[in-house]
Image (spheres, grey):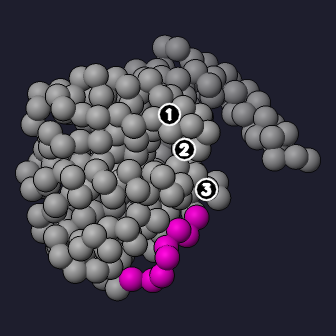
Amino acid sequence: MTKSARKALVVAWLRTYFRVASRFAPEAAVRKAVDIWCTLPTNTGRRKDNRHEPGERVEVDAGGRTIVAETWGTGPVVYLAHGWGGWRGQVSSFAPELVAAGFRVVTFDCLSHGDSDAGEHGPARSSGGEMIESFQAVYERFGPAHAVVGHSMGCASACRVILHGAQVGRLCLVSPNPDMAEIGRRFSRQVGLAPGLEEAFLEGCERWAHRSMHDFDIAPMGATGTLPAATVIIHDDADKEVPLAVAQQIADTWPGATLVTTHGLGHHRILIDPDVIAEVAKAVVG
């Protein structure tokens, strides 16, 4: 059986389950949908090791759990923040150029990601709230930054940490994530959860993350001008996970933001493209 056939079979099974459970066991259906939503994806693109060479491994305490960080170079700090289901090796493709430019690069695995400890909800499960808390713990260990480079969901966690008071001079968002409530509603429809249970599902996701779904919406975060004015957004027109329109909306609403559009790289290969690496270095250096 092909990979696509297996995926279609799983989707069909889920839709059947949720159609029945929505009618006869609605609370169980909502709990199951939240559990699936918060289970980390395992596709190989997110586990790519793009490190040029291993850096210094540093263990960071996060309320009794250990976050694994990795650093290269010396100088002003630049944080690299991975996305949902990713890990530090995936975004470390940007490290060599930044180290050569005179920066100390710090990247890390959020709880339940990569080599870090499992988070509140156990192995292979996490939340956007936990990603923010992971970044906050790393920031408290390494301090103010010249810049932050985020990928996908790492963009939202980076923005939220800055709004919480982190001192960051420049910001680069690579393939930033979309409105979370919107994709949550889309997910509930895709798996076949009854329309009347959609709001209960979103509320369940919020309880899991200990945050509102709107805390992860990037466009409103910078619209007030409270995030770094020197923000560069890089997004690909062939990204199947996040439409280019998301990045365009952010660029349109953020004062001073610049959008760089790439072609044919998708959501993950954009991290290893030489031209994108050069654009990220340019955005960080200024």
Q: Amino acid at mark 2?
A: His
- The answer to which of marks 3 and 2 sits earlier in the sequence is 3
Image marks 1 and 2: residues in contact by CB distance under 8 Å: yes
Q: CA distance from mark 3 to mark 1?
A: 15 Å
Indicate yes or no whether the magenta region holds residue 277: no
Going 29% across and 34% down the picture, which residue do you hit? 258
Q: Which residues are magenta?
A: 48-55
Q: What residue is pinned by disc 1?
A: 242
Q: What residue is pinned by disc 2?
A: 267
Front-lying residue, 36 or 235 = 235
- The answer to which of marks 1 and 2 sits earlier in the sequence is 1
Q: CA distance from mark 3 to mark 2?
A: 9 Å
Q: Quick one: SS at disc 2?
A: loop
Going 53% across and 68% down the picture, which residue do you hit? 50
Q: Please say if 48 is above or below 229.
A: below
Q: CA distance from mark 1 to mark 2?
A: 7 Å
- The answer to which of marks 3 and 1 sits earlier in the sequence is 3
Where is residue 230? Give x, y as percent.
18, 43
Q: Farthest right residue? A: 1
Q: Which mark is residue 45?
A: 3
Where is residue 47? Give x, y as percent.
57, 63
- Residue 210: quarter of image: top left
Q: Please say if 271 is above or below 24.
A: below
